[in-house]
Structures are given as C-alpha cells and as structure tokens.
Image (tube, grey):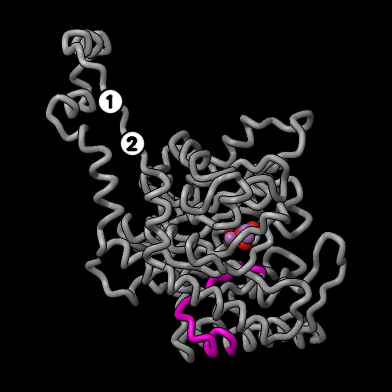
Amino acid sequence: LGKRMEDHLRFAACYWHSFCWNGFDPFGYDGTFERPWQHVADPMAAARAKADAAFEFFAKLGVPYYCFHDRDVAPEGATPRESVNHLHEMVDVLGEKQQQTGMKLLWGTANLFSHRRFMSGAATNPDPALFGMAALQVKEAMDATLKLGGENYVLWGGREGYETLLNTRMGQELDQMGRFLNMVVEYKHKIGFKGTILIEPKPREPTKHQYDYDVATVYGSLCRFGLEKEIKVNIEANHATLAGHSFEHEIATAIDLGIFGSIDMNRGDMQCQWDTDQFPNSIPDTALAMYLILQGGGFKTGGVNFDSKVRRQSIDPQDMFYGHIGGMDVTARALLIAEKMITDGRVEKAIADRYAGWKSPEAQNILAGKVSLDDLAAQVLAGGADPRPVSGRQEYMENLLNAFI
Ligand code: GLO
Ligand code: NI
Ligand code: NI
Ligand code: NI
C-alpha cells in the first residue's frame, strides 16, 4: 500500500458525545448521565474538571487524536468578549493536556447550532448581526485550532437550512453562505493555517431542508462559490444513510470529485430514522468503506473521528470504553480486510476487465471530445454489428467481499 498500516489508524475520539451530551433526547428533557462536573458551580472550574476527565479517558483509550467544538471545552460567557476569554483560557489548558498525554488534535470546529441565537441559522441567518457572531466564533475556533496544532478545521452547518419557503429567501441565504465560506478560506491563508477546511454534509436534521444535504450538493455549492479547490468534505456514516445513500457511496463520490477529506465514523439505525450516532459494528460495511478510502490514496490530513455515542440507557461510564473499543476494533479489522482486498487484486481486475473496451484508441478519442454525435452514429451504422451486452456479475462480486472477511 506504500504506507504502513498504522498510518491509516488516524483515529480520533470526540469531546462532545462523551463529555457534553448528557443522555437527553426529544422526550427525555433531562439527561440520564451523572457527570461530576455538572455539580461544580463555577463554569470555568467545571470546564477544567471536564477536561481532566476527557483527557484521562482519551489517554486510557490510547487514541492518538481528539476533536472538539469551542463550546464543548469553554462555556459561553455573558458577553462575546467573555466567551472569547473563556476559550483562550481553555486553549492553554488543552495545550498542556496535549503535552502531558501526547494527544493530537485532528480538527477543531465551532458550535453554531446549540445556542438559541442561531435558531434561524448562523451564516444563513436573516440578521447580519448573527452572521457576525458566527464569524467571531469561527475566527476564534480557527485560531484555537492553529494554536493547538490541529490538522484540519470542520464546518458542519448545523442550522444552515430552512423550515418553510414562506419565510425564507433561499437564494440570498446561499449567497450569504458562499460569502462566509470565502471569508473562512481567506482567513485560513491570512493566519497561515496549513490544514484542510472540511464541510460536513448532513440532510434533514436539525432543519427540515439542510443546505449541505450530501456530498454532491456540497460540491455543487463549492463550485458556485469558487471553492472546490479549497474545501473538502468530512463524511459521516449516519449522515450518508439519512440522505438515502450508503456510506461508501458518499466516500466514492467525494473521491471522484476530488474533495475527499476525512470521516466521522458511526452507524445509523435502520429503525430509528435519525442521527443516532451508534458505534460502527458492521465489519462488511466498514470494510467496503475502508477499501474505497485506501484505493483512493488513504487519509492525507484527515482521519477517522468516532462521532459516536453510547445510548441514553448506558449510564455506566465503562460503556464508553466498550463503545469506543468495539468501534475501533471493527474499523481496524475493516482496514486489514481492505488491505487484503487490494493486495489480492481480484476486485480491481474484475472492474478493469469490465471497462476494457474503453482502452482502445477509438474509444479514447470519444472521451477526448474528438468525435461528434453524428460521426459516431455513422461509424456504428458502417460497422454493422450489434454490440453484445456487458455482464455486471453483481452476485459474484458481492459475494467476493465475504471471501476477505
Ligand atoms: C451532527 C454532526 C456533528 C458534527 C460536529 C462537527 O450531526 O455529526 O456532531 O460532526 O458538529 O462539526
Ligand atoms: Ni459528525
Ligand atoms: Ni452527525
Ligand atoms: Ni451523527
């Protein structure tokens, strides 16, 4: 593979599911988890206690990377200035923790979706004052990411979408989003951040019509904003299935469009049609995803962030270890299977054989734009023969995957 297997184990644990989400759901207004820092009255003391617990967990897990939102690590203050001061203080704490544990930051991000001020969007808000608040938060989160040596910066447009066109100017909101993303990219260059900016597509939740629906939609927007060379995507398994795709379809689409960046690893639940963020547990599905990623050149600056959480009923802190260890084992096994598939070469060869006809100089001329529709039609008539159908061998190929597991 040209790279040692360990180079692909760029696994990250996320701060928010294990240390911020408390087990609430739309019917459980209160969480089910007991967190010691919830009872600490001073918000900054609570943030420090939370950081102690988070890094103790990351270190015990032995995971090399973590990811966080600004508000996961530092509480909102009474004014924008106070919120910024909180973040600066906590970035120093995180820096010390990284030094002590050897943990690295896979990516940083800003939470532009939990606070009520963002209920009608962040960059796509009808009020420019809220666009400004989003800019402040992203600027500060990018600074924090740079300072902590983060390798990427993620933008998930949590509230960038709408509920009804009877109160929404969609065209204007998309223009606002384009301006915002261009400002982010300009700022990245201004501060000399070398990492990749990643958009995380997601459909249907929390707004009814999310603008960053899936990889193809994001690509269309990036082209419209002139940013298709500047921004890549962070693909989440559960978001892919919510959009009616498979995880591997979204990965393959991004690779083919040249915008594959990183993945958020989890698994959707076919019965609960929302973003349940379960730990991955299907080896065949994960193997296929890893196969495509390795075939596409592997992870460059990106990695595998476990955007996964234990269930509301799993209040035993040990379940957090079981969840992560199980999910990481599944992913590691999937990587080994993917490696076997690549060295074996049968899948690759079967695909090459299927498209072999396109290797001829005549066929290459068609793809190179050297043949017109009517010329080609005339050639077919002159040739006389009726072309034979090409077999898909779908059942054989799908079963072949099982031979590697
Ligand atoms: C929500 C998303 C969210 C993002 C995170 C990073 O469904 O998956 O967890 O990954 O906000 O921006
Ligand atoms: Ni995610
Ligand atoms: Ni998600
Ligand atoms: Ni999710």
Q: Residues within 10 Å of mark 2 (few under 14, many from 20)?
A: few
Residue 399 showing in the rendered view? yes
Residue 83: % across, % down: 68, 69
| Circle 2: residue type | Ser
Query: Residue 381 versus residue 376: which sits nearer the camera?
Result: 381
- Which residue corresponds to mark 2? 391
* The disc label shown at residue 14, or none: none
Q: Is mark 2 within 8 Å of ligand 4?
A: no
Which span of residues is magenta-colored? 56-71
Residue 59 lies in the magenta-colored region: yes
SS for dot 1? loop
Question: In which quadrant of this rendering is ligand 4 seen?
Answer: bottom right
Residue 179 lies in the magenta-colored region: no
Seen at 52% across and 88% down, the residue is 59
Residue 384: % across, % down: 19, 11
Residue 383: % across, % down: 17, 13
State whether residue 181 is above or below residue 281.
Answer: above
- Which residue corresponds to mark 1? 388
| Circle 1: residue type | Arg
Residue 147: % across, % down: 46, 73
Q: Is mark 1 within 8 Å of ligand 4?
A: no
Q: Along the horizontal axis of the image, is 169 left or right of 302?
A: right
Quadrant containing the C terminus is bottom left
Query: Residue 4 versus residue 101: which sits nearer the camera?
Result: 4
State whether residue 81 is above or below residue 204.
Answer: below
Quadrant containing the N terminus is bottom left
Seen at 55% across and 80% down, the residue is 325
State whether residue 174 is above or below residue 374.
Answer: below
